[in-house]
Image (cartoon, coloured by chain):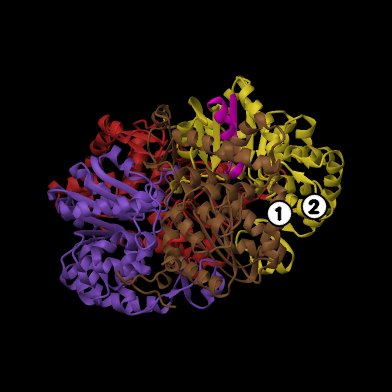
Chain colours: A yellow, B brown, C red, D purple
Amino acid sequence: MDVTDLKINDKEYLPTGFQATNLGRAIGIIEKMKKENATIFLTFTSNMVASGLRGVFAQMCKKKLVDVIITAGGSLDHDLIRSNKKYLIGDFTMDDKELHQKGINRIGNILVPNECYVYLEKFMQPVYEELYQSEKIVSPSQIARKIGEKTREDSFLYWCTKNKIPVFCPGITDSAIGLQTYFFKQKRKDFGIDVTKDMNELAQLAMNANKTGGIILGGGISKHHAIGVNLLRDGFDYAVYVTTSSPWDGSLSGARTNEGISWGKIKEKANHVTVDCDASIAVPLIMEKFLK
Amino acid sequence: MDVTDLKINDKEYLPTGFQATNLGRAIGIIEKMKKENATIFLTFTSNMVASGLRGVFAQMCKKKLVDVIITAGGSLDHDLIRSNKKYLIGDFTMDDKELHQKGINRIGNILVPNECYVYLEKFMQPVYEELYQSEKIVSPSQIARKIGEKTREDSFLYWCTKNKIPVFCPGITDSAIGLQTYFFKQKRKDFGIDVTKDMNELAQLAMNANKTGGIILGGGISKHHAIGVNLLRDGFDYAVYVTTSSPWDGSLSGARTNEGISWGKIKEKANHVTVDCDASIAVPLIMEKFLK
Amino acid sequence: MDVTDLKINDKEYLPTGFQATNLGRAIGIIEKMKKENATIFLTFTSNMVASGLRGVFAQMCKKKLVDVIITAGGSLDHDLIRSNKKYLIGDFTMDDKELHQKGINRIGNILVPNECYVYLEKFMQPVYEELYQSEKIVSPSQIARKIGEKTREDSFLYWCTKNKIPVFCPGITDSAIGLQTYFFKQKRKDFGIDVTKDMNELAQLAMNANKTGGIILGGGISKHHAIGVNLLRDGFDYAVYVTTSSPWDGSLSGARTNEGISWGKIKEKANHVTVDCDASIAVPLIMEKFLK
Amino acid sequence: MDVTDLKINDKEYLPTGFQATNLGRAIGIIEKMKKENATIFLTFTSNMVASGLRGVFAQMCKKKLVDVIITAGGSLDHDLIRSNKKYLIGDFTMDDKELHQKGINRIGNILVPNECYVYLEKFMQPVYEELYQSEKIVSPSQIARKIGEKTREDSFLYWCTKNKIPVFCPGITDSAIGLQTYFFKQKRKDFGIDVTKDMNELAQLAMNANKTGGIILGGGISKHHAIGVNLLRDGFDYAVYVTTSSPWDGSLSGARTNEGISWGKIKEKANHVTVDCDASIAVPLIMEKFLK
């Protein structure tokens, strides 16, 4: 394919070169996932749910574009809180001591007022009590589903619960929602979260699928969990990574799709691409076509 | 302080500028942690345990330089396997299809032969059985401690168990060791890992400490879990981050120490620094002084 | 401003958070540049001209959106060659030994066949002769203008010459076009390029402007030259940087706009933003509004 | 080679993995350059000369470890100024408006007081006059040599002049020293810098060498100029890059050594490695062995 000069109003990513080309490839690969009716695993990090990307995720779940979600505990926090409370746009260079004195928490250039976590506590304690009443030891996906029953339509968890899209959260205690279990356990000492409880369902989803596709946004535990479970079926058939991390330190977060092939986490014959770009810019461009 | 021209054989990091200065500051901050007898939280990602840094971590645990470890499940895999099997040095640009056909898995420029995971399975199934016999629902730190009882002196888990340094692993199912629980549960359906079980011990360690210090290597769940629990005591008194991730996408992995101040995860008055460098180079330089 | 969930088909960058917000700010700042009739300095690196961004630059010059261009010598090469020859889309992981044997040169995922440089030589030798006949010692901007006289309408140099937008190229010998002067000097030993010749014109443009704005894409000599000359007027009034480089090593390429304020290269009261994103994705999004 | 656990006091980079391995390879490649008596090209960016690395460069020139230097104009500024004036260690997060008001310029975490540039002006105007008296149109390397005649032993330019190591500076006008020529030309209108004047000497150095090696620190014009001229001899025989830039945007600064092979800028059979690390940390470790 020739490199083609960009014409505004007629943007074509594929023949532009560099990451624009990879972004174009990502769109093409997701088209194939859809066409082949692949079981699609979507993963994202919690900071993304603190941003406007939450709206994209909610639309993807509403339209049933994805079949499985794997994410960090913090994604549950932010999704839940933002149905009721506002986060603010700030700046990367704000004075963090001043912010702390004002009771404002910073995530890059997004600001989260302390009152958000007061709300979270008030919301979650009864949720845990309700879960506890039916079962003393729950799984992360049960918690996510229960929150989805109680939030609003702007929430991705709402749509996951409604559309029966399981939300796996293998590191759930590492979040504000997780910290709430520490408080909850002060009175309900025998409450627990058994993370092995979700493993069979997740494994079946990977193993029983005809084809699987991964839309892997950012790194961390969510990324690894998605590619890890696809080991059980000898790898993803389609994989799109969006990352800003570097592969040169051997980190999983920065690993490109091709590294996954050596492990059998992505098939040798898979269509795959790594888009090196901030998700807040890349994801809306990639998903535009599928959300119209 | 003036910028000072480097003289080889008399390397001084502090007055050199750029990340050398930050590396020098990291050493100074860890000196203060030690002098103030702070409870030190060490976190690292699992790829680091696949590298020679495992030796540094083992020495740190042997010398009781740290009091708490928080890490990813994969760190347990690599630590355990490498007591018995060899990983190899490869290259970042190797052909991953070829590697896959040869049964070799790539982590950056480190190669892990498949047989390593055969060994892991043989080792872990009886460990899970032994744990199960005493308790059906275990915690991640119990698993880590049990492995430490059975490995060799080159392993950091060995020294953690011996020296009673707890190893927390909030995302333990996301690893090869975690995947083994999926197999183990085929026969022992009521076996489980309750991740809330470790929360009280971890919380007490943070809350009861006079001072706390964090040596936070890389990002991910381990980093967040360490700073998250320090919220309960209004933040770390000392914090050293080593990272190669970018803060510009709002990710926790790329967040600098100052962002933690807004949250109360690091104290306003804390000594803190972020060293932007691959841990495989930075960590031996930072720890040299403390391991002599 | 509140963080707002993204709605596809109604993309708003500003309230999205992270780099999407910075991208939205960049658009707003360029709107102000235009409204205030600022003298706009555009800088870019040569790899961008090898990509589809060349089309964006050409349109910007055709529409007289910018007043001054500062770029690397290689931008002249690629602009000239691509009016006549095709570059191809490849991949970042291609085998470079194989490519070399096939006579194909790689720039990231863009491929440049050797014949392109045969064409360049055939084109440039008579151009240098023509320049030499009128003046023995020329300036970089004279060379750029002369090429613009002879290329096609798809070329940015064509529009710069036509619209009298000066193209400054302080490092011109470091390029294929520069290497051609080495060959040309074999027969015309007294031919030369005096880089000080362009300094007065550039300085006057900065000093005589009522307001100045910088659209600084990528790093290197072009970035520094633009901000350096604005020192003479106590800094840019408006500045947009697009970069993927890290500031943590003290490099100019990775320096954020705020560092420029300490130098007086950007005014204390300037509107400024740094967008951390690959230009191939960010630039079309930023310029869309202005090229319709 | 097996991955080997690091033992402090007996640091071995090669078997550690990740960038430590690449750092070990860099040392090995430079050993081969020396053993094979290769003509060594050293390139660096100007911010490095603002740091303590200036001392390493001066020692390398004093010991004649390198044969050719290619660098940015700013390296001449900083080298000259720092023989007489102090730069200070600051922090990456300082308030740039405050710094500006105090007359302090920031380079990452290095601070340059304004008086440094007053000194530069006082030093350089007579140097230009002296050069002008002997020749009206000079080359960048003549300027560098003349400064070296007049500075102190702590300066790398001093040792270059003394040891006849040519210093090429293809983008010289883009620097404070370059800006001084703008002022100088107010009175000496026919003074000029012909950048083509240095091309023959540089080309001969590459073409006449039996073997060539590159120690390429950072990116920019200096990096490209070194690999560009080695095209004339079908590429470097040995190449070490140290960079923090990303290759994913197709930039030359982020390009790995293997990309250079496609161009014939590095030989297919060359020994080469890219170390992804801040030079302020990596370079002293790499050069230690050679400067004892």
Quarter placement of the N terminus of chain B: bottom left
Q: Amino acid at mark 1?
A: Met
Which quarter of the picture shows residue A68? Answer: top right
Out of A121 and D214, give the one closest to the viewer.
A121
Residue C137 part of the magenta segment: no
What x and y, as percent, mark residue B198?
Answer: 69, 52
Left/right of residue C85 with respect to residue A147 in the rendered view: left
Q: Find numbered disc 2 in the image and state the secondary structure of the residue it sits on.
A: helix
Q: Is residue C71 visible?
A: no
Residues in magenta, as a range: A212-234
Secondary structure mostly taken by the magenta-highlighted segment of the chain: helix
Q: Is residue B185 left or right of residue C259?
A: right
The percent coordinates of residue B237 (x first, y second) are 62, 69
Q: As shown in the figure, which amino acid type bears the numbered disc 2?
A: Lys
User: How far is disc 1 from disc 2 in space, using C-alphas?
Assistant: 10 Å
Q: Which quadrant is home to the C terminus of chain B?
A: bottom left
